[in-house]
Image (cartoon, rainbow, N blue to C red):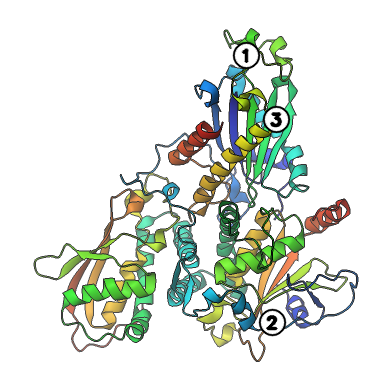
Amino acid sequence: MAAPPRHSTMLSISNGGTQQSGPNDKQTQQQAQTLPQSPGLRVPSNRKTIYDRHLNRSRNAELSRASFAYLFGEMVTYAQRRVTGIQDLEKRLNEQGYPLGLRLLDLLFYRSTSTSSSALSSSSTSSSPPNRPLRIITLLHLIHGPLWRLLFGRSADALEHSVSPDTPNEYMITDNDPLVNTYISVPREMSMLNCAAFVAGIIEGVCDGCGFETKVSAHNQPTEMWPSRTVFLVRFGDSVMEREKVLERAGVK
Amino acid sequence: MSYYFTILSPTDTPLFNIAFGTSKGGGDGIARFRFPETAQYMNQFIIHSSLDILEEAQWTNGGMYLKHIDTYPPAAAYISAFLTPSGARFLLLHQPPHLPSSTSTGSGLGSSSLLGSAGSTTRASSSSVAANPTSPQTEEAVRQFMNEVYENYVKTAMSPFYKQGMEIRSPVFRTRVTAAGKKWL
Amino acid sequence: MSANKTSRIGEEIWKSVNPQTPIITEKPFSIYSTAFRPRTQANQLFPRRTRVDKVNAELVTLTYGTIVAQLCQDYDSDYQEVNKQLDKMGYNIGMRLIEDFLAKSGVGRCANFRETADMIAKVGFKIFLNVTPTVTNWASDNNQFSLIFEDNPLADFVELPDDGRAQDELWFSNILCGVLRGSLEMVQMQIEAHFVSDVLRGDETTEMRVSLVRYIEDEMPPEEE
């Protein structure tokens, strides 16, 4: 979702007190309440607050894969109880992934500015300070490489661009064996369901955060060797494609 | 030097504001803006008027710290910007010290002070940061300040209960920003 | 996602833009099939990450945070209800996790509740959360103890909502109580577990109180909740 034009934003600020947003709408949640300064939360005397914890503390920490599987399984089961169909369920999983994408984006960049061994530098040579992605390809490489490594300990398996003249805005990121599907056995009647919709939401959050209006969906594309192979279809909005042309002409990388 | 620092959401909603003065060169850390009565309003106005320039810079310069992007001569104010990759904007307005004519009362909003010319600071501070808002030393000090705020912002945003666009109300966060201001500016 | 979108993915209209392969832009209409890249190649680039039974701890942390935040939203910040739901989820997990635990730890039957407590802290939490809470504050009848958590990966990065209620009502890590209840029930122990303090609430420690209710003799395991 792209930011609305400035004038409409100003309007929404002035109406902020009266307009209530729907709980599930990502964009309309962004109205800050102007409440008086609060005394804040209680903190323990040893000052264990989020601000006292180094952001890199758990950077290389590992946990049991089973723990993740159990939690994710419960998350899907819970979501399933509150929806009516597969599309609805995937939408909900997507929405739960979205804010994670925004968080991971900030975390990735923080880590690459704060340490010498950059989390964003590719496996090759680059050691320059990280830049916000301005072009689609840079953004997708960020997702395919650093984001995937942060989440899953390896890069994604493929990144492809549609060569159809009708859909220049479509890209695919492929994961041959998504972690999120490893422990999930989907009932036969829900064979269309792909729980990697959660990861699709994360990708959407990353793209949106960087200013690239996008829709991302997860699709089962099994092969003989990779039965849970999943394709994330990334579709950029018109505003992104327009800007892409302008930046291309301006020589922005 | 007086500072007004604000964090705006990607859709320009203010998430955090703070005004403070320089602590360098014997400064007492208290903000003394030209127009104390209307400082808050003026500062927000000046910052919002620089957003179009910011949006242009956002797509030509991929850095997070964009240095000083705009000036507002009527108030002799400078705007520095830092963009988080997730779209939040950190904006710092810096205004050199009062002109001698407006130091005494600070209550009037005379037309003469509105036209006060940029950079004609007579009460020059010994600090290089205060002396020249566009010097490399200043840019570097602001960069350090922004980086430190960014670290604390990421800590805020990592909490599962923080949703993008929510006002940052934590007193600990405020303390951290104040400390960063004291340390670098 | 319409059907034609899905089917188009299978067609060969995609050109690889992997960072490893040069991006070819001068032939916009040629058709490339995906360069097949087996997993081993990725692993060679990151040899440290090859342990298949491990995941990045932050993925677990962030996923759990998402679950709790979602519950708070769905139940409109009715934190009592959120605690209940978390406990229920934990119970479901515990019932399935115990098998995994027995297989991974290879431990046998505990002789008494004190031994059970040590097993939970030193083996169970170690395997699944990579922490070892301290077992302490035993009741005189040896049927009640506390687990004190020095570290709690579930709560990393977390600050409770500043709404004047969450710090009094929400037990953020309450899922753990359910996990203990569910897993011990599968090995014939009915227990009760609840948190009595949490650093997220501003308390000095994070402490869970665990009480043995009874040993379940010769009964069928209960139905899943």
Q: Which of the marked residues, 1 or 3, is nearer the chain's N terminus?
A: 1
Residue type at numbered disc 2: Arg
Label 3 chain ID = B
Residue at screen point 73% across, 32% down: B70
Residue type at numbered disc 3: Thr
Q: Name the residue under label 1.
A: B123
Q: Please, which residue is most extreme toward the left here?
A: C140
In the rendered structure, the answer to whether residue B78 lies left or right of residue B22 reads right
Label placed on residue B134: 3
Q: Please, which residue is most extreme toward the bottom here?
A: A224
A188 versus A251 height, above or below:
below
Q: How far apart are marks 3 and 2 (CA)?
A: 50 Å
Could you tell me which quadrant the C terminus of chain C lies in? Answer: bottom left
Label placed on residue C37: 2
* Nearer the observer, B170 or A83: B170
Residue type at numbered disc 1: Arg
